[in-house]
Amino acid sequence: MNETWNVAIYLFADDDTTHGVVTGAHAVLTTPTGSTLDGWGRAQFSSYDLDVPEVGTELAAARALRQLADRLLQATSEDLDDLEVHAIHLVR
Protein backbone atom coordinates (compact mmCIF):
# COMPACT_ATOMS: atom_id res chain seq x y z
CA MET A 1 0.00 0.00 0.00
CA ASN A 2 1.35 3.40 -1.00
CA GLU A 3 -0.39 6.54 0.18
CA THR A 4 0.45 10.17 0.63
CA TRP A 5 -0.83 12.07 3.61
CA ASN A 6 -0.50 15.83 3.38
CA VAL A 7 0.11 18.28 6.19
CA ALA A 8 -0.41 21.99 5.60
CA ILE A 9 0.82 24.52 8.14
CA TYR A 10 -0.88 27.89 8.13
CA LEU A 11 1.08 30.65 9.88
CA PHE A 12 -0.13 34.01 11.08
CA ALA A 13 1.25 36.79 13.27
CA ASP A 14 -0.31 39.55 15.31
CA ASP A 15 1.74 42.49 16.51
CA ASP A 16 0.10 43.16 19.87
CA THR A 17 1.57 46.39 21.23
CA THR A 18 0.89 45.28 24.81
CA HIS A 19 2.29 41.74 24.65
CA GLY A 20 4.71 41.85 21.71
CA VAL A 21 4.40 39.65 18.65
CA VAL A 22 2.18 36.57 18.82
CA THR A 23 2.79 33.99 16.09
CA GLY A 24 0.21 31.28 15.52
CA ALA A 25 0.23 28.08 13.51
CA HIS A 26 -2.52 25.71 12.41
CA ALA A 27 -1.35 22.30 11.15
CA VAL A 28 -3.90 20.29 9.17
CA LEU A 29 -3.39 16.63 8.21
CA THR A 30 -5.48 15.35 5.30
CA THR A 31 -5.62 11.66 4.38
CA PRO A 32 -6.45 10.30 0.90
CA THR A 33 -9.97 9.51 2.12
CA GLY A 34 -10.49 13.15 3.08
CA SER A 35 -10.24 12.64 6.84
CA THR A 36 -8.59 15.52 8.66
CA LEU A 37 -6.94 16.14 12.01
CA ASP A 38 -5.47 19.40 13.16
CA GLY A 39 -3.28 20.99 15.78
CA TRP A 40 -2.69 24.54 16.95
CA GLY A 41 0.42 26.23 18.28
CA ARG A 42 1.54 29.70 19.25
CA ALA A 43 4.61 31.59 20.31
CA GLN A 44 4.65 34.93 22.06
CA PHE A 45 7.62 37.21 22.26
CA SER A 46 7.78 40.44 24.19
CA SER A 47 8.91 43.70 22.70
CA TYR A 48 12.16 43.27 24.66
CA ASP A 49 13.16 40.06 22.82
CA LEU A 50 15.42 40.08 19.79
CA ASP A 51 13.58 40.62 16.51
CA VAL A 52 14.02 37.18 14.92
CA PRO A 53 10.62 36.26 13.41
CA GLU A 54 11.86 32.86 12.22
CA VAL A 55 12.16 31.67 15.82
CA GLY A 56 8.53 32.47 16.58
CA THR A 57 7.43 30.83 13.33
CA GLU A 58 9.42 27.67 14.06
CA LEU A 59 8.17 27.45 17.64
CA ALA A 60 4.52 27.96 16.72
CA ALA A 61 4.78 25.41 13.88
CA ALA A 62 6.51 22.87 16.14
CA ARG A 63 3.82 23.22 18.78
CA ALA A 64 1.06 22.82 16.19
CA LEU A 65 2.74 19.69 14.80
CA ARG A 66 3.21 18.27 18.30
CA GLN A 67 -0.50 18.74 19.08
CA LEU A 68 -1.38 17.20 15.71
CA ALA A 69 0.84 14.19 16.46
CA ASP A 70 -0.75 13.76 19.91
CA ARG A 71 -4.22 13.88 18.36
CA LEU A 72 -3.24 11.31 15.72
CA LEU A 73 -1.93 8.96 18.43
CA GLN A 74 -5.16 9.43 20.39
CA ALA A 75 -7.28 8.69 17.31
CA THR A 76 -5.21 5.57 16.63
CA SER A 77 -5.62 4.40 20.21
CA GLU A 78 -9.38 4.91 20.01
CA ASP A 79 -9.55 3.02 16.71
CA LEU A 80 -7.64 0.11 18.27
CA ASP A 81 -9.93 0.16 21.31
CA ASP A 82 -12.89 -0.25 18.97
CA LEU A 83 -11.26 -3.34 17.44
CA GLU A 84 -10.04 -5.00 20.64
CA VAL A 85 -11.91 -6.37 23.65
CA HIS A 86 -9.37 -4.93 26.10
CA ALA A 87 -8.03 -1.43 26.62
CA ILE A 88 -5.11 -0.37 24.45
CA HIS A 89 -2.37 1.99 25.60
CA LEU A 90 0.11 3.16 22.98
CA VAL A 91 3.62 3.74 24.28
CA ARG A 92 5.09 7.02 23.07
Image (tube, rainbow, N blue to C red):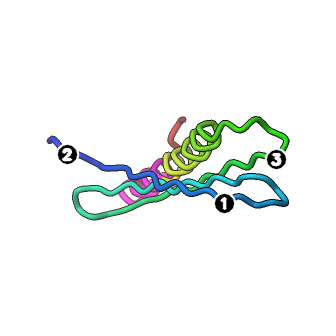
Helix, strand or loop for the magenta stretch, by majority = helix
Q: Are marks 1 and 2 in contact (CB under 8 Å)?
A: no
Q: State which region is magenta.
A: 72-89
Quarter holding residue 36:
bottom left
Residue under numbered circle 1: 14
Q: Please tell me how crowded label 1 is: few (under 14), some (14-19), or many (20+) other residues with Cα within 10 Å.
A: few
Residue found at x 57% / y 56% = 40
Which badge, 3 or 2, is on the more N-terminal residue?
A: 2
Residue under numbered circle 3: 47
- Residue type (three-letter) at the residue carrying disc 2: Glu
Quarter holding residue 61:
top right
- In this view, which residue lies farthest toward the left? 1
Decide which of 16, 63 is in the foreground and name it: 16
Residue under numbered circle 2: 3
Residue 41 x/y as whole percent: 61, 52
Which badge, 1 or 2, is on the more N-terminal residue?
A: 2
Location of the C terminus (image quadrant): top right
The CA span between labels 1 and 3 is 13 Å
Helix, strand or loop at disc 2? loop
The CA span between labels 1 and 2 is 36 Å
Relative horizontal placement of residue 47, taking residue 9 as reference (left or right): right
Q: Please tell me how crowded label 3 is: few (under 14), some (14-19), or many (20+) other residues with Cα within 10 Å.
A: some
Helix, strand or loop at disc 3? loop
Q: Are marks 3 and 2 in contact (CB under 8 Å)?
A: no
Relative horizontal placement of residue 35, taking residue 42 as reference (left or right): left
The CA span between labels 3 and 2 is 44 Å
Residue found at x 68% / y 48% = 43
Decide which of 54, 25 is in the foreground and name it: 54
